[in-house]
C-alpha cells in the first residue's frame, strides 16, 4: 500500500506535485502521521493481514518514516539502540545518474528484510 501523502498539494505530474510540496515547505508531520496511521489501521484490519506492517521511505519518505517513530523528534541515530522493531538502512552516495543495479540490489534487500520480519 502506498498512501498518497501529497494529495492535499494538488494534482499533476509527479514532478509538478513535488515542486509544489517543496515550495510549500514539504509535507507536514501531523498530516503524514495521521494519513499513515489511517492506512495502517485499514491494512491491519484486512482479513488476510497478520497484523504486522513495515514502512520504507526514500529521500523525504525516509524522513516521513522517521516521523512515525514513537521516539521523535530525536535524531534517528540516537534512538536506534532503543528500537523495539527491526531496522534496515540503505545508504548511497548522491549522484545525478540513476543506477539500476544499485536500485535492484536495494529492493532485494528490503523485500528480503520484510519477508524475514513481516512474513
Image (cartoon, rainbow, N blue to C red):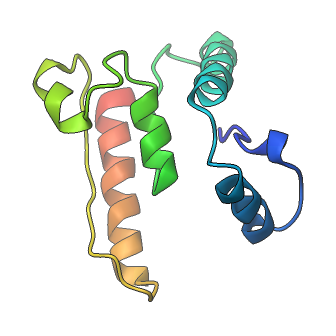
Quarter of the rendering occupied by the C terminus: top left
Q: Relative to 51, does residue 19 appear above or below in the rendering? A: below
Q: Quarter of the image holding residue 85? A: top left
Residue 63, horizontal then vertical, whole percent:
44, 43
Residue 38, horizontal then vertical, whole percent:
68, 17
Figure disc tally = 0
Query: Residue most toward the front?
Result: 24
Q: Relative to 25, does residue 85 appear above or below in the rendering? A: above
Q: Quarter of the image holding residue 114? A: top left
Residue 37, horizontal then vertical, whole percent:
60, 18
Q: Quarter of the image holding residue 65? A: top left
Query: Which sits in the foreground, 55 or 8?
Result: 8
Residue 77, horizontal then vertical, whole percent:
17, 37
Residue 56 visible, this angle: no
Which residue is at a point 15% across and 18% down the rendered structure image? 82
Query: Which sits in the foreground, 101 or 6?
Result: 6
Query: Residue most toward the right?
Result: 11
Horizontal relation, residue 28 to residue 11: left or right: left
Residue 18 visible, this angle: yes
Quarter of the rendering occupied by the N terminus: top right
Which residue is at a point 61% across and 26% down the rendered structure image? 36
Which residue is at a point 35% across and 22% down the rendered structure image? 72
Which residue is at a point 57% across and 18% down the rendered structure image? 49
Query: Residue most toward the bottom?
Result: 97
Q: Relative to 41, does residue 3 appear above or below in the rendering? A: below
Amino acid at each position: 500500500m502506498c498512501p498518497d501523502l501529497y494529495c492535499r498539494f494538488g494534482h499533476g505530474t509527479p514532478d509538478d506535485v513535488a515542486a509544489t510540496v517543496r515550495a510549500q515547505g514539504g509535507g507536514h508531520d501531523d498530516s503524514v502521521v495521521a494519513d499513515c496511521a489511517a492506512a495502517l489501521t485499514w491494512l491491519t484490519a484486512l482479513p488476510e493481514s497478520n497484523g504486522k506492517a513495515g514502512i520504507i521511505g526514500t529521500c523525504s519518505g525516509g524522513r516521513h518514516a522517521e516521523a512515525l517513530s514513537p521516539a521523535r523528534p530525536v535524531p534517528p541515530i540516537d534512538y536506534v539502540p532503543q528500537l523495539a522493531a527491526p531496522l534496515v538502512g540503505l545508504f548511497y552516495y548522491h549522484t545525478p545518474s540513476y543506477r539500476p543495479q544499485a536500485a535492484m540490489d536495494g529492493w532485494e534487500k528490503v523485500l528480503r528484510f520484510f519477508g524475514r520480519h513481516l512474513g
